[in-house]
Image (spheres, rainbow, N blue to C red):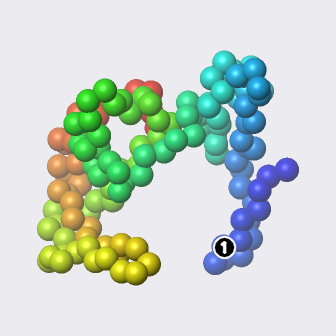
């Protein structure tokens, strides 16, 4: 049975496959095949070798994690880079991060180098051969 999600436009069904449940022996089924990687899964038609996903707050445009010695994006299933705009933006003026009793609040303002720099200079330096 497929999960049902409610949204602003009403309920809809996804075409996602149920996530595999790793066995105690360290094997799981991916696409109906026995898989020796217990973390691997298929989600919405995409294969991931790990359910771990690095989000943009951790990795920015991908340059940040390349500076961590011993870390590879192959250690995670996917990497989500920051959003970008057509032209470079400096973002909001300081102060952009505020501490509140409930936690941190930020208003960075889409600071980014622009889509041309991301596509031409940043993305070619990142290795996504084994990561989505």
Query: In this figure, what is the number of numbered marks?
Result: 1
Q: Position of residue 54 (x, y in %)?
A: 43, 46
Where 75 falls versus 12 (above or below)?
A: above
Mark 1 surroundings within 10 Å by alpha-carbon count, few (fewer than 14), some (14 through 19), many (20 or more)? few
| 101 or 87, nearer to the observer | 101
Position of 60 compared to 33: left or right? left
Where 105 falls versus 60 (above or below)?
A: below
Q: Position of residue 36 (x, y in %)?
A: 66, 18
Given the current orientation, which residue lies at the most extreme right position? 1
The residue that appears at 77% across and 56% down in the rendered structure is 3
Determine whether the residue tagged by mark 1 lies in a helix, strand or loop.
strand
- Is residue 38 visible to the viewer in this orientation of the structure? yes
| 117 or 27, nearer to the observer | 27
Where 105 falls versus 16 (above or below)?
A: below
Residue 23 occupies which quadrant of the picture?
top right
Q: Position of residue 99 (x, y in %)?
A: 31, 76
Where 54 falls versus 5 (above or below)?
A: above
Residue with the mark numbered 1: 7
The residue that appears at 40% across and 74% down in the rendered structure is 103
Q: Position of residue 57 (x, y in %)?
A: 35, 56
Position of 34 compared to 108: left or right? right
| 48 or 59, nearer to the observer | 59
The residue that appears at 57% across and 40% down in the rendered structure is 51
Position of 48 compared to 21: left or right? left
């Amino acid at each position: 049975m497929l999960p049902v999600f409610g949204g602003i436009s009403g309920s809809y069904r996804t075409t996602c496959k149920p996530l595999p449940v790793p066995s105690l022996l360290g094997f799981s089924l991916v696409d109906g095949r026995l898989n020796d990687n217990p973390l691997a899964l298929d989600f919405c038609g995409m294969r991931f070798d790990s359910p771990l996903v690095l989000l943009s707050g951790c990795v920015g445009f991908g340059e940040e994690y390349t500076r961590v010695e011993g870390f590879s994006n192959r250690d995670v299933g996917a990497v989500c880079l920051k959003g970008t705009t057509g032209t470079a933006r400096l973002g909001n003026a300081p102060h952009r991060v505020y501490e509140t009793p409930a936690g941190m609040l930020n208003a960075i303002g889409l600071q980014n180098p622009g889509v041309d720099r991301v596509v031409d200079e940043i993305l070619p330096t990142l290795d996504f051969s084994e990561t989505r």
